[in-house]
Amino acid sequence: MPGGWQVATVVGINDETDRAKTFRLRLHEPRPHLAGQHYVFRLTAPDGYTASRSYSIASAPDGSAEREFTVERLADGEVSMFLHDVVEVGDELEVRGPIGGWFVWDGSTPALLVGGGSGIVPLMSMLRLARSTGRSDRVRLVVSVRAPEDLWYAQELPGPETAVVDSLRSRGFAVAVAIAIMVVARRLYKRIRSRAQRPTEPGLQRAAHWLAVRAWMEPRGFEGASSFAANNASRALAYAAALGLAERATDELPIVPEDDRLAWSNATGEWHVVRVRYPFRPGYGRHPGLMLLVGLVVGGGLLALQRFLLEVARGEALRSVFEDFPDQADLIETTALVLAAITIAPLLWMAWLVIAGAFDIFSTVERQGLVVRARRPQRVVPFPRLLRPLARRDRFALFIAVDDGRSDRVGAWLSNERTAVPQGARARVRATPVLGYVRSSEPVGTAR
Ligand SMILES: Cc1cc2nc3c(=O)[nH]c(=O)nc-3n(C[C@H](O)[C@H](O)[C@H](O)COP(=O)(O)OP(=O)(O)OC[C@H]3O[C@@H](n4cnc5c(N)ncnc54)[C@H](O)[C@@H]3O)c2cc1C
């Protein structure tokens, strides 16, 4: 049974985290309590106004007259702010308890304890009881925190019977897994919906025939093509096209249809399908020296800005603003922190430009083969159609994918008006490995 109101003396105050303090109170009329019970604290203003709030007991029942309570400081919280900002060791507080009979544990049964925030306080009392009576085997405690520095009782809590879940990290991991699943699902969906057929041995042989006809006709055009250029099967396709059955005919053909990302290539003398990638990352296709410079200058500026914003948040800069608007101190601090956080993304971007630029300045890769694809960036960027104009650059740019027959996957590089090569040409192209900036290109031999 709870007693009536009594006075308790504050005999100790400890910081648990930035926002949580543990108060050690000596009761003048101590009553035994169970782990999980709480006390009510009552504050009385000089004008008689009172405010009461409940606080769980954090200490284990140990027969002493002292009890511990951990209080989280809530922004604009009437009682918690008073306890945090005003109460000192030696002060007296009015309390009533112990109260509560539903959420208690006497140590006799196994208990699984799961909590977070201030909800961990009564669980701590139970854990302390289990440990002090040598019955740790009866409890398992799982604590969830946003970040490791938010953990209360950080020195005491860890042990074989406890587990701390860092929810921000696990949430971040869950988001990453969800994104990965979505990407894989999108690829699977595209593959299932794709009308492209899987190349088979007989299919490849027939495809080689059709592609040879096409390669023969391409430089000559249709007009010059003799009817002997095509055998009966080719003629059947011509009839099908004439009769408006071309789409059906292409369905029947054992050929993987080509598009921006799929190309037939005979760079090695043998026809094979090449998958073309159009990398999309900051600075791609730009001169590495320029990117290094931009990264250093803009990154340096951003770093200085971020440092300044953090100083503002700590109250070390723009003091006059704090003095002019003391009521808005929290708002100014939060705004500065949010702005400082926002600068992280462009800072990472600039760091990437510095690393990639510095690496690429001294490195070049060369590829000689068939230019299987030449595409303008706005056609192949992974943006929804509406946003594609954003990929337009003032200067001419052309993705070129050179197949040298070494792999069925080719990453396209970005060329400019000086280094661009038309699709179908054979060329020797030199580019930087990370930023894919085409340094030079020269034709070698004729088109396919
Ligand atoms: C059984 C029990 C045990 C508890 N144990 C603990 C414990 O161990 N540790 C602990 O820290 N807490 C514990 N609590 C919670 C505690 O009792 C208080 O609720 C808490 O400290 C907030 O009180 P406060 O007076 O500081 O805030 P309040 O003044 O009550 O305000 C609470 C929140 O509401 C906001 N608010 C207030 N008024 C308004 C308004 N008009 N409009 C919008 N928002 C408003 C405040 O800004 C604040 O963020 C426990 C509660 C219960 C019931």
Image (tube, helix red, strand yellow):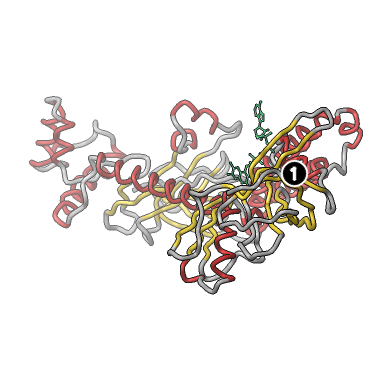
Q: 185 or 260, which lies in front?
A: 185
Work out whether residue 431 can be spotted: no
Instruction: State the count of labels.
Output: 1
Q: Position of residue 366 (x, y in %)?
A: 51, 59
Q: Residue, x 51% and y 44% (percent of image)?
A: 280
Amino acid type indicated by mark 1: Glu
Q: Secondary structure at mark 1?
A: strand
Q: Is residue 135 visible?
A: yes
Q: Residue furthest bottom?
A: 134
Image-based side of 230 in relation to 30, left or right: left
Does residue 390 sit above or below 178 in this rendering? above
Closest to the observer, 236 or 320: 320
Q: Residues within 10 Å of mark 1 (few under 14, many from 20)?
A: some
User: Which residue in the protein does label 1 denote?
Assistant: 94
Location of residue 153 (image quadrant): bottom right
Q: Position of residue 68 (x, y in %)?
A: 69, 56
Whether residue 214 sits left or right of residue 339 in the image: it is: left
Quadrant for residue 213, please give it: top left
90 to 219, vertically: above or below: below
- Which quadrant of the frame does ligand 1 lie within? top right
Q: Position of residue 73 (x, y in %)?
A: 71, 43
Q: Nearer the viewer, residue 257 or 156?
A: 156
Q: Position of residue 87 (x, y in %)?
A: 81, 46
